[in-house]
Amino acid sequence: MKRRGRGIACMWYPIGFTVSANPSAAVVKVNEDGTATLLTGTVETGQGSLTILAQIVAEELGIATDDVHVVSADTDTTPMDTGAIASRTTYVTGNAARLAAEKAKKILFEVAAPLLGVKPEHLEVGDHKIRIKGFPQRSLHIGDVAERARGVNGDPPIGSASFNPATAALDAETGQGKPFATYVYATQIAEVEVDDETGEVEVLRIAASHDCGTPINPMLVEGQVEGGISMGVGFALEEEILFDATGRQINPNLTNYIMPTSLDMPKVEVDIVDSYDPTGPFGAKGVGEPTCVPTAAAILNAIHDAVGVRVTSLPATAEKVYAALKAKRAQEGKRLGAGA
Amino acid sequence: MATVTLTLNGDVRTASVPPETTLLRLLREEFGLTGSKLGCDVGDCGACTVIVDGKSVNSCLMLAVQADGRDVVTIEGLATMSRLHPLQQLFEDKGSLQCGFCGPGVIMSAKALLDENPDPSEQEIRDALAGNLCRCTGYSKMIEAIQAVARDGRGEPAKSAV
Ligand code: FES
Ligand code: FES
């Protein structure tokens, strides 16, 4: 008989390295046509980091995302980045990019302030313009200011910055310290159907609620969560590297190393929790790795809810679930026998 | 050597290849069409999917000579200079791909499905993509994009891309 169950799991996850330095650096230059160029060492692998970095620079400079040219991952030209790892790019590289853009913007404000007859601190950016706060009609086009900064003031609007998350080493005696600058949190709920005659598990639905600070690009956040959950489903039920006695992998291919297909993946509902981290770029933290952390735990809790067995090693294959069911029945049989 | 003549993305092309050459290698190495990917070379991953006479096929499992006289469409045959194919456009709008390695194969499987069944259910879409492994996305946004293309085909306004 097929039995349904639901399970829940929560997690927290740190952004960046544990205590040790993991800086990112960035260069932003504002061009005379009102576009900007960002140099970053980070690597795009499809997660959308470069889009998010362009959005951050665009927001800081008041221009469109499409007007930010991103040059990335070239040791000839781009500054150092610790890497697209540790779920750190939006937070660490994003902070570096924002700070670099802010420095370029400062130069533009110095140039624009006397032209607009105010102090630099009375200026803001928006809509491709540098304008007076409260008097947006008094403004200059950002490209014209960039041109003047270079050609008249002799101070081209270029900013460079680096960012290293603020941590403090753990005290060896008390264990106290600050190993990470920030953390993200999530809860996932899985609904499964377990066949109590075969041990087969089908995941019917997963609801995932994730805090990543400000979601700078909600569509990309959803993509990360959905992808992470597919890895979590594989981790929970299918994926396993098998070795023979000599240590040779016996399933080095996709025929025998089973991973989720479109038929194995349930409907995933993603809920992005509204939050703001004042230490992140525009309140953002990160979202990469944390997405697959609670999935397997939620699924195994759901299996327990459905058929009352705890599987304690992954993946929870049909064989393992079936063996646990059989052991449970034998146990119950014994207890019944003892009672009689 | 064996001579193969086929219609490739609308053009008649001929090549002379060793008889054991797969259709995938013919496409990639003889014709330089590297959109179809070599993921596993044994039919497990679907990254090499192309359309042969209207059916989606793992081109790593088909010999080049078996394509002789047939009509083959690859990912390169979809876009024009000025316009992406609706599937490509919706995959882009909805962020359906991440690393993209599975993408050409997924899009060709989706095209073969929609050519045959312009109004598929979600389950039919999942069935059609079952041979295309994706490590990055969990498939959700691909399915949404394919549904949106189907909706457009029925003349209904697509939900605006997020
Ligand atoms: S390369 Fe053909 S199925 Fe993997
Ligand atoms: S997008 Fe990376 S494998 Fe599908």
Image (cartoon, rainbow, N blue to C red):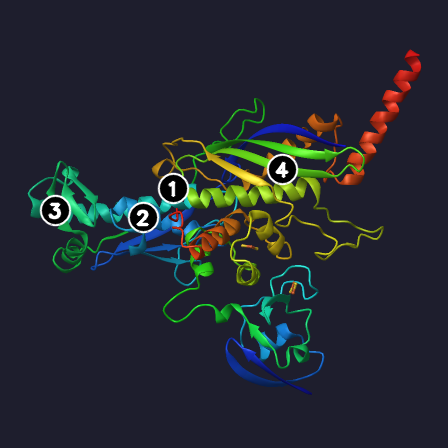
Of mark 4 and mark 1, the one earlier in the sequence is: 4
Q: Earlier in the sequence, mark 3 or mark 4?
A: 3
Which residue is more in the foreground, A107 or A220? A220
The residue shown at (52%, 56%) is: B99
Mark 3, residue position:
A139
Earlier in the chain: of badge 2 and badge 1, it is 2
- Indicate which disc residue A204 carries: 4
State the residue position of label 1: A216
Callout 1 amino acid: Ile
Q: CA distance from mark 4 to mark 1?
A: 30 Å
Residue tagged by mark 2?
Answer: A57
> For numbered disc 3, what is the local secondary structure?
strand
- Label 3: chain? A
For the point 83% across and 34% down, which residue is it?
A323
Q: Nearer the viewer, residue B9 or A299?
A: B9
The answer to which of A69 and A261 lies nearer the viewer is A261
Disc 2 under 8 Å from ligand 2? The reply is no
State the residue at coordinates (85%, 50%). Answer: A245
Report in which chain the residue with disc 2 lies. A
